[in-house]
Amino acid sequence: MPENSGQVTVRALLGLFTVAPCLLLPTWPGFMDSAGAQVAGREVEAQPAREPSQPHHTSPGQETVAQSAPSIQALMVTKNHVVYAGSFGQGIFRSRDRGGSWDAVNTGLKDLFILCLAYGKDGTLYAGTFRAGVFQSRDGGANWQAINTGLKRLEIKVLLIEDDVIYAGTGDGVYRLSDLDKRWKTVSTGLDETLVHTLARASDGTLYAGTSSKGVLRYRATASAWTRLSQGLVDHEGLGQNFIRVLVVDKDQDLYAGTCDGGVFRSSDRGQTWRPISQALPNDSIRGIVTNDSGLFVATGRGIFKSQNKGLKWTPLNSGLVELSVQVLIASGDGPMYAGTSAGVFRSDDGGQSWIGVSQGLQGTIESPFK
């Protein structure tokens, strides 16, 4: 395979397959995130990665890895201030004391590689997994049940709940499930066999999807298909940005797009045109975006940064954040901010000015994603 093909071949326990480097988001020994991607011991990008823990082999076809804290891919806070953390390989953890302690809540989960979490108005929890689709829990995570009827692909990258409708970004486009439906249904046409990483919804009901190969697309209820929105999605090297990890709509209905390796873009005209706003950031790998009254927060592969003028100037917010490879960032209303990293969870009680590690109880053993 040519070196400039933009792809990496991974020899897994079940055979040989090919993936794009930016798809390697979770951290697992030999399966590092894209800030220092490493696959099967081969370095993909020039930036250094943390030394992985040594694997402990069990039976043939399986592998487990001992580590201090898992890679956290998803975080969620309920209206009762209960925090849930979705890990890559150890399932879901729950904390009732703002991260002071955690308990595993995995009964019924068929896949412990969690990619996203969502919370319904009725208190129902939802989890999207790497290999086994969507699960729901109506008892605070004590028990989980699969709800996958109608889904073509079971890799669930994002779950979005709006007006009692659940939207899922999958390896086969966007699906929706309402209280009246018994099965998932596709949202229009144009995203077949396309991996959708992120979803956002504007106040007028417009739905936006960020994908791994087609950039940003828009869907309106009156439209017959998804519309691609690519004007201006070009990085400082003149490369078109087709891999979108994060989409966020702020209170002014400005749209923000976080890319795999091209930084952050902003649109003030509902996605018609874009302009880059992260030239001053030290890392272009965007993993999370939060907007609130105090500013714009961006999580990257090298820490968290804040802007109070929509990207004109950025300030680092990494005091106490000893693991800078951030995977997910959330704000819980007027409560704390939480950051999920490649080595556990951190909490900030002062708007990101300082962080403390809150991973007690997250320690354990993970399984190989290739078993």
Image (cartoon, rainbow, N blue to C red):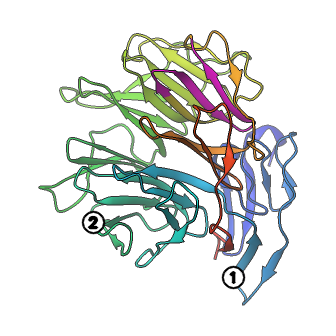
Instruction: Give the residue drawn at x 20%, y 30%.
Output: 221
Q: Residue furthest left?
A: 180
The residue wearing badge 2 is 149
Q: Looking at the figure, which quarter contains the C terminus?
A: bottom right
Asked if one can make out residue 152 in the rendered structure from this viewpoint, the answer is: no
Q: What number is the disc on residue 295? A: none
Q: Secondary structure at mark 1?
A: loop
Residue 268 sits above or below residue 21 on the image: above
Residue 298 is a magenta residue: yes
Residue 54 sits above or below residue 351 on the image: below
181 sits left or right of 90 in the view: left
- Residue 28 percent coordinates (x, y): 72, 62
Query: What amino acid does circle 1 point to?
Result: Gln
- Residue 151 percent coordinates (x, y): 33, 60
Quadrant position of residue 263: top right
Instruction: Give the residue drawn at x 43%, y 10%.
Output: 268
Of the pair 163 and 139, the residue shown nearer to us: 139
Query: How would you rate the neighbour count of disc 1 (Cα within 10 Å): few for under 14, some for 14-19, many for 20 or more?
Result: some
94 sits left or right of 24 in the view: left
- Residue 183 percent coordinates (x, y): 21, 61
Magenta portion: prevailing SS class: strand
Rounded to the nearest angstrom, the CA distance separating label 2 from label 1 is 29 Å
Query: How would you rate the neighbour count of disc 2 (Cα within 10 Å): few for under 14, some for 14-19, many for 20 or more?
Result: few
The residue wearing badge 1 is 62
Q: Which residues are magenta?
A: 291-308
Q: Secondary structure at mark 2?
A: loop
Of the pair 94 and 127, the residue shown nearer to us: 94
Marked residue nearer the N-terminal end (2 or 1): 1
